Image (spheres, helix red, strand yellow):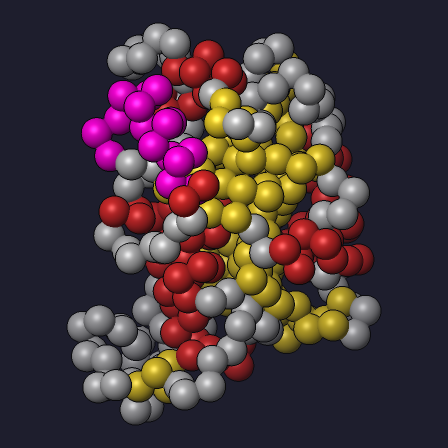
């Protein structure tokens, strides 16, 4: 394969990858991601020792050791556009030689676990629970630009959802890493997560902007394809799962359920729910 041009893989003057500001030695092959930059320290405060603390834009990275295991925690900001940057640059750090700009012959497979917050779409998914996204459906258009391969079942789900929502593009559907599900999420609520391209109207929230589709939340809640239904929604998971499939990394998204959009309740102890999930992941990862 030819060398990757400077305009395609941008490397900073200090040798770091463009947005993340990281060198290959700055990260572990086991990574925890969070959306909020301030949440990075809530994970790394449990580390026994710290090696790396680097921040650029919304991407804050801490690498250290927890009970003898080297871990990296990094913030992403919100949305699948940020996940596009994160996943490509993490992959470049481990699978592209920055000197020759050529793809390495032997590939490294990262294990990446997202710890995030989410709202429930079903009354049966209670506030305060920890939900593992076994499958995620993306309502954003990121995969209109990538050659994502999907199964017939995944395509059937997205075709039906496209029809019911009246979308001008096909959503995409991708599954989590089975090995990470078994290792980390064996006792969590299993879910199918809808990834939305925004927090307000795409998730059926009405402030002053209004909604084009007044029955949007009802459609999400009642969508069925055989035994498949949507359990919760957020803004990143489908981006993770699709990029993981394309680039060959193990991906898992875990959700602290802090809101139930059907009962219109918000968890009073939301931060504790998140903190409990952080500790659980650190013990199992």
The quadrant where residue 161 appears: top left
Q: Residue 67, position in %: x, y?
A: 81, 69
Q: Position of residue 116 (x, y in %)?
A: 58, 42
Residue 22 visible to an observer of this rendering: yes
Q: Is residue 14 left or right of residue 259?
A: left
Q: Is residue 140 above or below residue 126?
A: below
Q: Is residue 238 visible?
A: no
| Quadrant of res 228 | top right
* Left-right relation of 250 to 7: right
Quarter of the picture holding the C terminus: bottom right
Q: How many marks?
A: 0
Measuring 42% from the left and 23% from the top, which residue is drawn there?
203
Q: Is residue 178 above or below residue 189?
A: below
Give yes or no for residue 58 being in the magenta stretch: no
Decide whether residue 164 is among the magenta residues. yes
Q: Identify which residue, 258 or 166, lies in the foreground.
A: 166
- Which residue corresponds to the image point at 26% horizontal and 73% vertical from the top-left? 10
């Amino acid at each position: 394969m030819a060398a990757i041009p400077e305009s395609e893989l941008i490397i900073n003057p200090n040798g770091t990858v463009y947005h993340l500001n990281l060198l290959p030695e700055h990260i572990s092959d086991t990574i925890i991601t969070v959306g909020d930059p301030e949440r990075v320290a809530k994970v790394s405060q449990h580390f026994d020792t710290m090696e790396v603390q680097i921040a650029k834009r919304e991407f804050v990275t801490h690498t250290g050791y927890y009970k003898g295991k080297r871990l990296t925690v990094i913030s992403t900001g919100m949305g699948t556009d940020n996940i596009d940057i994160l996943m490509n640059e993490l992959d470049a750090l481990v699978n592209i030689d920055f000197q020759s700009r050529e793809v390495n012959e032997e590939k490294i497979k990262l294990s990446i676990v997202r710890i995030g917050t989410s709202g429930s779409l079903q009354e049966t998914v209670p506030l305060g629970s920890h939900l593992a996204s076994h499958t995620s459906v993306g309502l954003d258009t990121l995969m209109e630009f990538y050659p994502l391969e999907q199964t017939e079942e995944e395509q059937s789900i997205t075709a039906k959802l496209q029809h019911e929502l009246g979308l001008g593009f096909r959503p995409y559907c991708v599954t989590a890493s089975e090995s990470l599900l078994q290792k980390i999420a064996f006792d969590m609520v299993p879910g199918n997560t809808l990834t939305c391209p925004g927090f307000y109207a795409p998730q059926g929230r009405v402030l002053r902007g209004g909604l084009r589709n007044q029955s949007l939340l009802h459609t999400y809640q009642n969508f069925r394809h055989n035994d498949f239904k949507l359990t919760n929604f957020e803004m990143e998971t489908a981006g993770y799962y699709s990029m993981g499939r394309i680039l060959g990394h193990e991906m898992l998204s875990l959700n602290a359920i802090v809101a139930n959009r059907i009962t219109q309740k918000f968890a009073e102890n939301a931060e504790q729910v998140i903190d409990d999930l952080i500790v659980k992941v650190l013990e199992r990862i």
